[in-house]
Image (cartoon, helix red, strand yellow):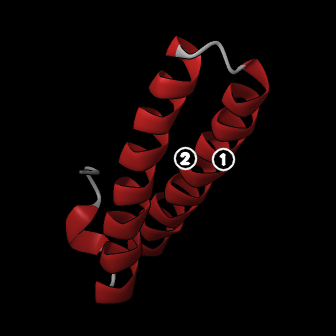
């Protein structure tokens, strides 16, 4: 997990775990869509991955700012 794990609230930690689970699902889906040659689906899934990663980074960023 993040280096800021101890600085997250229980709710933030729960959301990070939820996001990680969603990311695993999307990475598997991306791999399957890529293997099947479903380029449009790959684009959609990769956009979802980007959004999930951005949300995770935002939570971690605010946890780091809050600890300063």
Disc marking residue 53:
2
Residue 68 visible? The answer is no
- Residue sitting at x 57%, y 25%: 33
Residue 10 image-quadrant placement: bottom left
Residue 63 image-quadrant placement: bottom left
**In terms of secondary structure, where does tag 1 sit?**
helix
Q: Seen in the image, is 38 located left or right of residue 63?
A: right
Above or below, 8 against 65 in this view is below
Residue 27 screen position, x and y as percent: 44, 35
Density class for disc 2 (Cα within 10 Å; few <14, some 14-19, many ≥20) is: some
Q: Seen in the image, is 14 located left or right of residue 44?
A: left
Q: Seen in the image, is 30 located left or right of residue 51?
A: left
- Residue sitting at x 32%, y 78%: 14
Residue 30 screen position, x and y as percent: 53, 30
Density class for disc 1 (Cα within 10 Å; few <14, some 14-19, many ≥20) is: some
Cα separation, mark 2 vs mark 1, equals: 9 Å
Q: Nearer the viewer, residue 9 or 29?
A: 29
Above or below, 13 against 40 in this view is below
Comes first in the chain, label 2 or label 1 = 1
Which residue has dot 1 on it?
48
- Residue sitting at x 47%, y 26%: 32
Q: Nearer the viewer, residue 68 or 62?
A: 62
Which part of the image, by quadrant, shows the C terminus? Answer: bottom left
Above or below, 42 against 11 in this view is above
For the view shown, which residue lies furthest in the front direction?
36
Disc marking residue 18:
none
Residue 15 screen position, x and y as percent: 41, 74
For the view shown, which residue lies furthest in the right direction?
40
Residue 57 screen position, x and y as percent: 52, 52
Q: Nearer the viewer, residue 41 or 27?
A: 41
**In terms of secondary structure, where does tag 2 sit?**
helix
């Amino acid at each position: 997990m993040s280096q800021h794990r101890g600085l997250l609230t229980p709710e933030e930690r729960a959301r990070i775990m939820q996001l990680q689970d969603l990311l695993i699902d999307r990475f598997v889906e991306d791999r399957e869509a890529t293997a099947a040659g479903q380029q449009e689906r790959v684009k959609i899934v990769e956009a979802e991955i980007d959004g999930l990663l951005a949300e995770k980074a935002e939570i971690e960023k605010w946890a780091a700012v809050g600890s300063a």
